Amino acid sequence: MESEVDPGDSLYRTLAGAVVPRPIAWVSSQSLDGVDNLAPFSFFNVVGVRPPVVMFAPVDAADGLKDTPTNVRDTEEFVVNVVTMDLVEAMNETSATLPPGESEFDHAGLARAESTTISPPRVADAKVAFECTLYDFVDVGASSMVLGEVRFVHVADEVTTDGELDVEKLDAVGRLSGSYYATTRERFSLERPP
């Protein structure tokens, strides 16, 4: 299969199927009315380290922005919760389309934990959570790129060794395509060349 790309075409299936596995930003936000929102986004990554900036890129709904980017644009705050194997079913529940006044935390039966520096809560059982303030909000065609500066980090002791995050202990889940996901259980190491 080979084809020239028309900028107006959607390559969602090809991009989402080839750029794998993708980490999942399980983003909690809060509306101006105080409704807690929680939704997963697999277009997510680290952008910079000084300052520490992460990004997620929600695809717009047919009628405009989804709840999460609307909340972030309005309040300039959000939390990125890292999805681990023990939370994957609850994460999937929060991908349901709910009315704006209904919280995905309640829909999925998830406990909230207070954030330290911002208003939106974090997922209480998340092993890692990044409290963020809006760094930039960029329209990218039928998507939005939301960049957040990390202001506070929560890391559960059970996924640390000597006070540092231990990738061997964090059973993170990534998105493949369609209904497929991947874990980070199979790991190997390569030394970088000089």
Image (tube, rainbow, N blue to C red):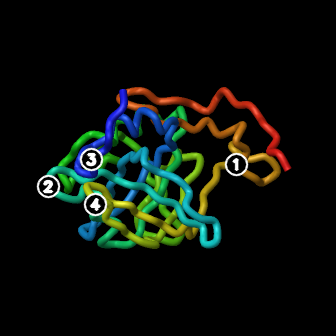
Image quadrant where residue 96 sits: top left
Ranked by sequence position, the earlier of labels 2 and 3 is 3
Drawn side of residue 89 relative to residue 173, left or right: left
Element marked by disc 1: helix
Which image quarter is the N terminus in?
A: top left
Element marked by disc 4: loop
Instruction: Give the residue type at disc 2.
Output: Asp
Q: Which residue is pictured at 40% across the width and 47% down the height?
A: 41
Work out whether residue 80 or residue 111 is closer to the camera in this orientation and state it: 80
The CA distance from mark 4 to mark 1 is: 30 Å
Label 4 sits on residue: 35
The CA distance from mark 1 to mark 2 is: 42 Å
**x, y percentage for residue 51?**
60, 72
The CA distance from mark 1 to mark 3 is: 48 Å
Ranked by sequence position, the earlier of labels 1 and 3 is 3
Ranked by sequence position, the earlier of labels 4 and 1 is 4
Q: Are marks 4 and 3 in contact (CB under 8 Å)?
A: no
Q: Which residue is pictured at 60% across the width and 57% down the height?
A: 154
Element marked by disc 2: loop
Residue 190 drawn above or below residue 35: above
Q: Are marks 2 and 3 in contact (CB under 8 Å)?
A: no
**x, y percentage for residue 99?**
17, 50
Q: Nearer the viewer, mark 2 or mark 4?
A: 2
Element marked by disc 3: loop
Label 3 sits on residue: 6
Label 2 sits on residue: 63
**x, y percentage for residue 74?**
30, 72
Label 1 sits on residue: 157
The CA distance from mark 4 to mark 3 is: 39 Å
